[in-house]
Every structure is written in structure tokens, then in C-alpha cells.
Amino acid sequence: MMTHQLAASVVEFVVPLADPNVPTGADFKDWVLVIAGNIFIAILVLRAIGHYFKREWGELFGHIAAGVLVGGLIYANNQTINVLKGFWGLLSGGN
């Protein structure tokens, strides 16, 4: 097989994937993240109320700090992935 024939067959394979009518699953991913985020917020609020009534201030603030971190990971997942890729690039010496 010639090189240009191989390139043409690869282009024929890739072009249907670039069709905007082909579902990518991005909407489903967003829906799952919204559901997971709402469940996380509900659990956070219930645990925070429990810590507040038990007067466990250190655990309350620690729980809120962890909740903010994990909530940021849930709701800003693309930015988190980019930050982690940047850290990995710094550690591995890549671009």
C-alpha cells in the first residue's frame, strides 16, 4: 500500500468521527457531573449541620475546606484536568 493510499484511508476513517451529528457523550458527562455535584452538596450540608450541632468546630471547618476542594474538582473538572496536566508536564519535563 502506498503512503498516500494509507493517508487517504486514515482520513476516510477520521472524517466520520468529526461529524457534528455524531453524539460524543459530552451532554451525558455534564448531566452525570451535575447529579454527582448535587448529591455531594446535599451530603456536605447534612454533615456540616451535624458538626455544627455537636459543636465540633475543627471538624466543621476541615469538612468545609475539603468540600470546597472536592466541589471545585467536580464543577471545574476541565480546568482541574488542565492543571494536573500542567503539573505532570513540569514533573516529567514535557511541554
Image (spheres, grey):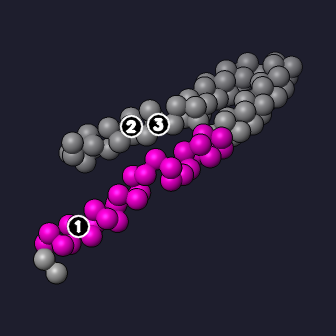
Q: Secondary structure at mark 3?
A: helix
Q: Is residue 17 visible?
A: yes
Dot 1 or dot 3: first in sequence order is 1
Residue assigned mark 2? 82
Inter-mark Cα distance, 1 to 3: 33 Å
Residue range highlighted in magenta: 3-32
2 or 1: mark nearer the eye: 1
Q: Which amino acid type is shown beneath numbered disc 3?
A: Asn
Residue beneath the point at 35% across and 58% down: 15
Residue assigned mark 1? 8
Inter-mark Cα distance, 3 to 2: 6 Å
Dot 2 or dot 1: first in sequence order is 1
The image quadrant that residue 68 belongs to is top right
Residue beneath the point at 21% across and 46% down: 94
Residue at the far right in the pictured view: 53
Mark number displayed over residue 78: 3
